[in-house]
Image (cartoon, helix red, strand yellow):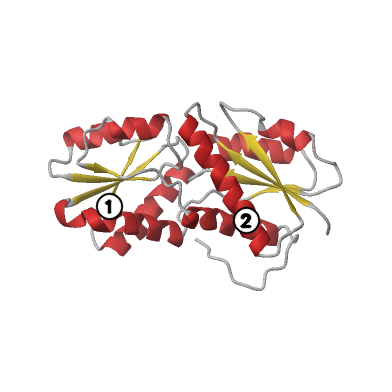
């Protein structure tokens, strides 16, 4: 059906390292698309906060008769997916949006691999997410923690950097006394990863990026959206929640 525009839309950050990691993620996604033979995809940079260009502006610059899919470079649903991205998509015909990472099984596997080297000395494991007021996003994080718990064979508690409870600093200061392994479910370096570093946890893992497996998880979400819109027929099954 000709060209399909993909707007890889991230939150945006003032952190230079975080910005670079997002650029590298977009490059990985483009390479994955080329390797899969999806040469009709045209890639665009976009942001929902902090950085430019903003998502509505990029969508508005596209040829009106060509389809577009917004790929949120976000871990879970929140205000930016349900309002900013959903609003931008609704304002343009022939446009859809993919889901954020959510609780993809492969994401749980990535986090489990990062935890393995620390489990013997850290009886307590906490999954730390950015946080959202929306129950939908909190449910996704809790489901991811459940899958991670199965992978690790032990309980995994959930905490947030902002927007939801329990806040990570409150959980660590009041409820957990043993050495704690904090698994970062943040996408890239920035304000919240710095906040995790200030909690005093025994071990805090790096953000999800850089990791080609994370890029593959986002690519799964893109494939799902293209298939659901009828813009792509996929022979291979894709992972689903």
Residue at position x 46%, y 34% in the image: 17
Give left or right: position of 224 versus 170: right
Secondary structure beneath disc 1?
A: loop
Residue at position x 53%, y 58% in the image: 216
The answer to whether one can see residue 167 in this image is no
Say which quadrant the N terminus sits in.
bottom right
Residue 122 sits above or below residue 169 on the image: below
Percent across and percent down for residue 164 are: 38, 35
Secondary structure beneath disc 2?
A: helix
Give left or right: position of 199 versus 137: left
Percent across and percent down for residue 171 are: 24, 37
Residue 101 sits above or below residue 63 on the image: below
Q: How crowded is mark 1: few (under 14 residues within 10 Å), some or many (20 or more)?
A: many
Task: Residue 156: give its label.
Answer: 1
Q: Residues within 10 Å of mark 2 (few under 14, many from 20)?
A: some
Task: Residue 31: give its label.
Answer: 2
Mark toward the start of the polypeptide (2 vs 1)? 2
What's the CA distance linking mark 2 and mark 1?
34 Å
Residue that lies at the very extreme toward the bottom in this rendered image: 235
Task: Residue 169: give its label.
Answer: none
Query: Is residue 129 or residue 193 the one in the foreground?
Result: 193
Percent across and percent down for residue 141 are: 41, 48
Residue 237 sits above or below residue 101 on the image: below
């Amino acid at each position: 059906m000709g060209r399909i525009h993909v707007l890889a839309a991230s939150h945006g950050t003032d952190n230079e390292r975080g910005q670079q990691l997002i650029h590298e993620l977009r490059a990985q996604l483009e390479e994955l698309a080329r390797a899969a033979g999806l040469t009709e995809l045209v890639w665009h940079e976009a942001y929902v906060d902090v950085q430019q260009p903003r998502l509505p502006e990029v969508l508005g610059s596209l040829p009106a008769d060509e389809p577009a899919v917004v790929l949120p470079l976000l871990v879970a649903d929140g205000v930016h997916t349900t309002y900013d991205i959903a609003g931008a998509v609704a304002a343009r015909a022939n446009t859809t949006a993919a889901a954020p990472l959510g609780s993809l099984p492969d994401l749980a596997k990535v986090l489990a691999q990062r935890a393995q080297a620390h489990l013997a000395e850290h009886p307590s494991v906490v999954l730390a997410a950015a946080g959202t007021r929306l129950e939908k996003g909190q449910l996704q994080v809790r489901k991811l923690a459940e899958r991670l718990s199965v992978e690790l064979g032990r309980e995994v508690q959930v905490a947030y950097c902002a927007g939801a409870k329990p806040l990570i600093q409150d959980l660590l200061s009041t409820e957990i006394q043993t050495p704690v392994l904090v698994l970062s479910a943040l996408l890239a370096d920035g304000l919240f990863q710095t906040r995790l570093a200030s909690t005093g946890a025994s071990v805090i893992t790096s953000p999800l990026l850089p990791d080609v497996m994370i890029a593959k998880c986002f690519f799964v979400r893109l494939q799902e959206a293209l298939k659901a819109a009828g813009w792509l027929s996929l022979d291979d099954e894709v992972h689903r929640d």
